[in-house]
Image (cartoon, rainbow, N blue to C red):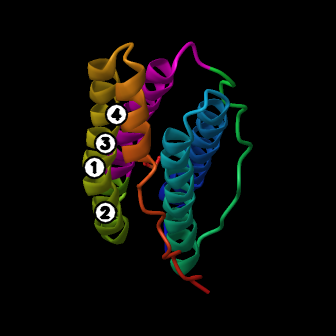
Amino acid sequence: MIGKKVNEAFNEQIMHEYFSAYLYFQMAAYLHSEGLDGMAHWMRVQTIEETIHGTKFFDHILERGGKVELLAIEKPQATWASPLEAFKAAMAHEQFITGRINELVAIAAKENDFASRTMLQWFVDEQIEEESNAEKNVRNLEMVGGSGQGLMMLDREMGARIMPIQFPPAAV
Ligand code: OFO
């Protein structure tokens, strides 16, 4: 059975993951409005991935006899000064999430919750990829600078991101 402290921290993390989804969905809308449908698609894929992350915590709590309690999700920022600023904000958000995951690892360790430690290792590894993708996007946009042609090429490339089709099965 999952302990109270870890259960509460995981409920909070579900909210953070769904906030991430909400933020990236808003970024997708912004990028569509800028005519960058490929980049918007990239953010839509990211949105789905974040809901999968939230669902992993949801399932883990249920599998271990805990109680899922969904918290309120804050309104995300609605617009950005440029696509580069949006992707910089996404990068900063992923760094924040990495900090959250590290905190969860520390809580699970303190509570001697080895099952959660194992489950959290997936997120530790995932955050390496999440931060690396976010940094790559910022680097590419900085490289393109004001070049319309470069932006179009990057938009096309990001539009090819594969949508995850596997959704975690229900735990109960
Ligand atoms: Fe973007 O990794 Fe979850 O939040």
* Mark 2 / mark 1, whichever is N-terminal: 2
Report the quarter where the C terminus lies.
bottom right
Q: Which residue is mark 3?
A: 133
At label 2, the amino acid type is Trp
Mark 1 vs ligand 1: CB under 8 Å? Answer: no
Q: Which residue is mark 2?
A: 122
**Nearer the observer, 28 or 148:** 148
> What crowding class fits label 3: few (fewer than 14 Cα within 10 Å), some (14-19), or many (20 or more)?
some
At label 3, the amino acid type is Asn
Residue that lies at the very extreme toward the bottom in this rendered image = 172
Q: Distance between the Cα atoms at labels 4 and 2?
A: 23 Å
Q: Which residue is mark 4?
A: 137
**Are the residues flagged by discs 3 and 1 in contact, CB closer than 8 Å?**
yes
Q: Residue at x 55, y 73 (%)?
A: 59
At label 1, the amino acid type is Glu
At label 4, the amino acid type is Asn
**Are the residues flagged by discs 4 and 3 in contact, CB closer than 8 Å?**
yes
Q: Which residues are magenta?
A: 80-107
Q: Which residue is mark 1?
A: 129
- Residue 36, quarter of the rendered image: top right
Label 1: element kind:
helix
Q: Say which of marks 4 and 2 sits in front.
A: 4
Relative to 17, residue 152 above or below: above
